Image (cartoon, rainbow, N blue to C red):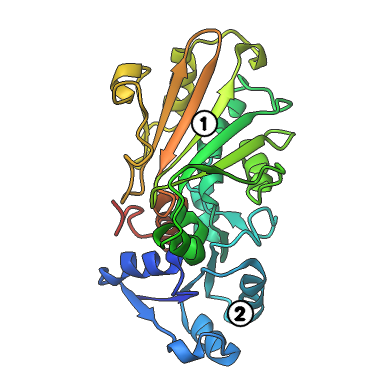
Amino acid sequence: MTYKVFVDGQEGTTGLQINEYLGQRTDIELLKIDSDKRKDLAERKRLINASDVTFLCLPDEAAKESVALVDNPNTCIIDASTAHRVNPDWVFGLPELCPEQRARIRASKRIANPGCHASAFILALRPLVTAGLLPATTQVAAHSITGYSGGGKSMIAHYEGPDRIDAPRPYALGLVHKHLPEMQAYTGVNLAPIFQPIVGPFYKGLAVTAYLHPQQFSRRATPADVRAILAGYYAGEAFIRVAPVDLEANTEGGFFNVEANNDSNRVDLFVFGNNERMLVVARLDNLGKGASGAAVQAMNVHLGVEEGLGLA
């Protein structure tokens, strides 16, 4: 069977990558909009409603505008913006979230694609909250380092232009990052995390590091115990690997490689530290599992095709 797919916002980094993923597939017919009609509401409406799946790779307000154009009940919308991620009428497009999530994605015509930082944070910590080891009342602190491609075309141009800055740049220092609502909602904690992201002078790759102290736990646990909870939760997941607790094997001379999952849809989870203090780290490609790869994976689940089709 062939499915018709439209990418609304096909010129952005996420849209371009989705088109690249889908352009190689024989089961997908890509509906393209002429460049001079990208802001033509009538043409966008026609293509959205002609599609089986439309990806929205747009700013929040433009994404809401596109949703309002839908009048075909069979069109599935997968929104890569932040506009609908905690909307109860939309399903969060993270199949590994919990055992019921794939059925929800399969049944819904409104799927909100997770943010890159949020995907890593949620995948690292939700199993610990679900297992009761990390109480829901805990306020978790975390940081993330990510490639500059996550900032879109303007940031890419800045980093690759003559005024490029070659040092890491912390941002969102007001501690109100746009991913906080989904990070809180889908991890299962009552308080928004203290979260501070950093843009690195590299194109892509992302690692979220959460700081855990055993005094936060509801029971005694070692790094191996934390690792066992993660491994059990994600047993059988094709795109998630939980690494053994092994500092030497998981680093390169003690240094952690943020870019090791680039050009893939994989997530690696690590537990570092000792019985007194620990880190849980989630690594992914911010343009892959952090954006376009996740959107295609959710589409595959929704359509009932092989989940990893077209993904590495």
Residue 128 in view in this figure: yes
Would you place residue 156 above or below residue 145 in this image? below
Q: Which mark is residue 176?
A: none
Q: Is residue 267 above or below residue 243?
A: below
Q: Is residue 221 left or right of residue 31?
A: right
As drawn, the label of residue 70 is 2
Q: Residue at x 48, y 22 (%)?
A: 229
Q: Nearer the viewer, mark 2 or mark 1?
A: 1
**Residue 165 in the figure: left or right of residue 133:** left
Q: Residue 198's x, y, as percent?
A: 53, 42
Mark 2 or mark 1, earlier in chain:
2
> What is the quadrant of residue 73 in the picture?
bottom right
Residue at figure coordinates x 32%, y 64% from the top left: 21
Residue 209 has which mark? 1
Q: Is residue 58 left or right of residue 244?
A: right
Residue 264, given in percent of the width and then of the height, sits at 32, 49
